[in-house]
């Protein structure tokens, strides 16, 4: 029906229907606007939450790094206390017993000499053991001379103890931040303990220390029996040596990768970005 043929009444009905439709559309528009506002609000809240999460993560990492630093400082303190209180006394006893032991035959009788000799040997062992504990707690060489001499020294001991061939290369000419050197040393030490303990059939251990693309990298490789990394990590959920390596590196923004397969040797590699850290040796 053409508009001019419609009755007034029909036009009024259609107009009312149109008005209703417009009103409905307006309601829908308002609803959409509200939805949009809500989405914008939710998006902003989510962004804020993400920012807070990142901030919290950074805080946790800083706290963990501070905790590790405090732990290292406490180890240093214990090592110094052991030195001041124990080693000095033991060394004095050692010298006295040595003098007693080297007295001419006729002076003390043979049983007393025997006891003195035993005591002398015990004190000698105690001094050497205490020095080992001190070194484990706090390797003075690291603070004074850095990683190079300490790595060489430990590889030398490994050679003497096991007969393995060892090698060490480095392109790093400078002292690294304290956190990195300490982390590298602890991971290197743990990796070497694992070689001694687990790498059956190994004959060679090599260590590489490199600076590459703003990252410090330490690699410890052996040619021993190797192991199934995924299976061991699945089984060992506790704080074992491998787990502690991963955590130590993670705390200062680094990563550890362990490549190994049964029969293929093992390679532990730690990479730590240099820019994240500013900790200096005192
Ligand atoms: N260099 C290695 N060669 C062979 N096996 C290794 C080596 N390092 C680690 N493993 C394997 O990984 C396991 C877990 O090592 P770790 O977490 O240091 O614990 P733990 O030394 O106390 O057994 C070891 O028990 C061993 O089976
Ligand atoms: Mg271990």
Image (cartoon, rainbow, N blue to C red):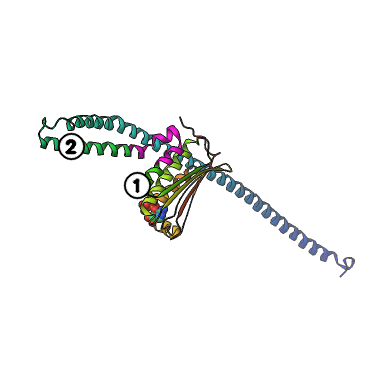
Question: Pointer 2: what residue?
Answer: 117
The percent position of residue 150, horizontal first and vertical second, equals 42, 39
The percent position of residue 81, horizontal first and vertical second, equals 31, 31
Viewer-proximal residue among 6 and 112: 112
Question: Pointer 1: what residue?
Answer: 161
Q: Residue at x 26, y 31 (%)?
A: 91
Prevailing secondary structure of the magenta residues: helix
Report if residue 148 lies within the magenta region.
yes
The percent position of residue 32, horizontal first and vertical second, equals 68, 54
Q: Secondary structure at mark 2?
A: helix
Any part of residue 77 in sight: yes
Q: Is 83 above or below relative to 51?
A: above
268 displayed left or right of 109? right
97 displayed left or right of 193? left
Q: Residue at x 34, y 34 (%)?
A: 79
User: From the Cβ of disc 2, is ligand 2 less than 8 Å away?
Assistant: no
Q: Is 196 above or below relative to 182?
A: below
The percent position of residue 33, horizontal first and vertical second, equals 68, 52
Report if residue 59 lies within the magenta region.
no
Distance between mark 1 and mark 2 Cα atoms: 27 Å
Viewer-proximal residue among 130 and 249: 130
Crowd band around label 1 with a 10 angstrom C-alpha radius: few (<14), some (14–19), many (20+)? few
In this view, the residue farthest toward the bottom is 1
Q: Earlier in the sequence, mark 1 or mark 2?
A: 2
Query: Which residues lie in the magenta part?
Result: 133-153
Q: Residue at x 39, y 58 (%)?
A: 235
Q: Is 152 above or below relative to 105?
A: below
256 displayed left or right of 16? left
Crowd band around label 2 with a 10 angstrom C-alpha radius: few (<14), some (14–19), many (20+)? some
In this view, the residue farthest toward the front is 105
Q: Secondary structure at mark 1?
A: helix
């Amino acid at each position: 029906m053409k508009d001019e043929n419609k009755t007034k009444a029909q036009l009024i009905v259609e107009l009312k229907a149109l008005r209703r439709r417009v009103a409905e559309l307006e309601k829908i528009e308002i609803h959409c606007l509200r939805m949009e506002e809500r989405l914008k609000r939710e998006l902003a809240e989510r962004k804020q939450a993400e920012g807070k999460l990142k901030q919290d993560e950074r805080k946790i990492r800083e706290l963990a790094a501070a905790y590790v630093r405090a732990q290292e400082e406490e180890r240093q303190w214990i090592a110094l206390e052991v030195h001041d209180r124990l080693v000095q006394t033991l060394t004095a006893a050692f010298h006295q017993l040595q003098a007693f032991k080297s007295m001419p035959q006729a002076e003390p009788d043979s049983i007393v000499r025997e006891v003195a000799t035993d005591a002398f040997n015990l004190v000698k062992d105690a001094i050497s053991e205490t020095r080992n504990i001190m070194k484990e707690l706090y390797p003075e060489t690291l603070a004074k001379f850095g990683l190079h001499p300490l790595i060489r020294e430990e590889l030398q001991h490994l050679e003497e103890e096991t007969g393995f061939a060892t090698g060490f290369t480095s392109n790093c000419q400078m002292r690294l931040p304290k956190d990195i050197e300490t982390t590298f040393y602890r991971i290197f030490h743990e990796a070497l303990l694992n070689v001694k303990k687990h790498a059956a059939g190994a004959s060679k251990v090599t260590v590489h220390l490199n600076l590459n693309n703003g990252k410090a990298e330490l690699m410890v490789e052996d040619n021993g029996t190797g192991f199934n990394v995924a299976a061991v990590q699945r089984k060992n959920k506790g704080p074992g040596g491998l787990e502690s390596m991963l955590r130590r590196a993670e705390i200062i923004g680094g990563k550890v990768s362990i490549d190994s397969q049964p029969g293929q040797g093992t390679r532990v590699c730690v990479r730590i970005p240099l820019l994240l850290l500013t900790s200096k040796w005192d």
